[in-house]
């Protein structure tokens, strides 16, 4: 984002080419964040407005179009379905977060797995028929899944005493993060809902297909860095 004054940073969307390592700025001063690529060239994102935010669609040339705006409500983490027709998004209202779905063209925002708890970080799995999300319905954040329809019943996918967060779909399941003896660890949740420990060096061997983001046929490698607790205590900004 851009520094505007002593009390304000403005978030914008940038695009990074993993092959050429070139960065392109898509928006300017739009206050947009949490972008998700639609697969059709544009992005779905959250745009901050005075004391609230809204769900928007951002074109490749930076034009922002409002999809949903609810007085008193807050959006976070929009994710596009595999077929590009729907969005799942975390929505906050009446003191709690819930998982919602809506059309990529706007319209009604329908709640999945309603209840008096916080459901956040939704992602599409099983080719778009199911949504995995992080929920504290048992007192500790773990991953739950539910069919992608309003009012569906949720099923626990993980059970960890220190919590599980950040589901991210991959072939044959999805990755999650949790805390281990040496800091955050990645684990893979397979179709049988059994979390598997990610062995050391896993990320060096894990390849992400860049053609999922852009029309390239080469691959990029994610590398794991060492964990150092002192880094979390250092100042984030210097004035």
Image: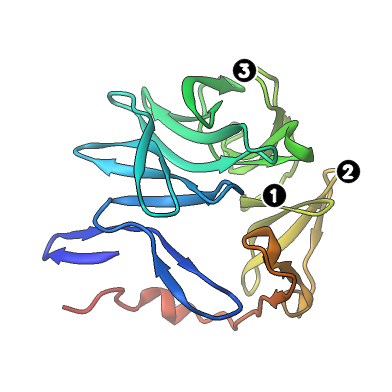
Q: Which residue is mark 3?
A: 150
The picture places residue 151, in percent across and down from the top left corner, at: 63, 16
The answer to which image quadrant residue 115 occupies is top right
Quarter occupied by residue 184 = bottom right
Point out which mark residue 229 bears. none
At 21% from the left and 79% from the top, the residue drawn is: 238
Q: Is residue 101 above or below residue 214?
A: above
Say whether residue 34 is left or right of residue 172: left
Q: Is residue 148 left or right of residue 61?
A: right
User: Looking at the image, which is closer to me, 163 or 6?
Assistant: 6
Point out the frontmost of discs 2 and 3.
Answer: 3
Q: CA distance from mark 1 to mark 3?
A: 27 Å
| Nearer to me, 100 or 19 | 19
Q: Position of residue 117 (x, y in %)?
A: 52, 28
Callout 1 crowding tier (Cα within 10 Å): few <14, some 14–19, many ≥20: few
Q: Quadrant of the C terminus?
A: bottom left
- Residue 53, image x, y percentages: 31, 37
Q: Quadrant of residue 157?
A: top right
> Nearer the N terminus, badge 2 or badge 3?
3
Give the mark toward the camera: 2 or 1: 2
Kindly identify which residue carries mark 1: 160
227 and 46: which is toward the camera = 46
Is residue 216 in sight in this rendering? yes
- N-terminal label among 2 and 1: 1
Residue 15 in the image: above or below residue 149: below
Q: Secondary structure at mark 2?
A: loop
- Dot label at residue 192: 2
- Secondary structure found at label 1: loop
In what quadrant of the picture does the N terminus appear?
bottom left
Residue 16: percent from left, percent from top: 50, 70
């Amino acid at each position: 984002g851009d520094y505007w004054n002593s009390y304000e940073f403005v978030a914008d969307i940038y695009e990074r080419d993993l092959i050429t390592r070139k960065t392109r700025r898509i928006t300017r001063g739009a206050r947009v964040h949490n972008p998700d690529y639609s697969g059709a060239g544009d992005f779905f994102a959250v745009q901050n407005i005075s004391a609230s935010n809204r769900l928007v669609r951002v074109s490749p040339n930076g034009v922002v179009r409002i999809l949903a705006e609810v007085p008193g409500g807050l959006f976070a983490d929009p994710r596009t379905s595999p077929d590009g027709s729907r969005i799942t998004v975390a929505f906050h209202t009446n003191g709690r977060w819930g998982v919602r779905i809506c059309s990529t063209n706007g319209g009604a925002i329908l709640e999945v797995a309603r209840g008096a708890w916080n459901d956040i970080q939704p992602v599409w799995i099983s080719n778009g028929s199911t949504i995995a999300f992080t929920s504290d319905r048992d007192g500790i954040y773990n991953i739950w899944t539910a069919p992608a329809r309003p009012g569906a019943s949720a099923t626990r996918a993980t059970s960890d005493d220190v919590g599980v967060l950040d589901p991210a779909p991959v072939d044959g399941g999805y990755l999650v993060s949790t805390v281990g003896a040496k800091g955050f660890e990645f684990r893979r949740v397979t179709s049988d809902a059994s979390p598997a420990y990610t062995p050391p060096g896993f990320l060096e061997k894990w390849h992400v297909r860049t053609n999922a983001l852009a029309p390239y046929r080469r691959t990029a490698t994610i590398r794991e860095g060492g964990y150092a607790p002192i880094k979390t205590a250092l100042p984030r900004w210097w004035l």
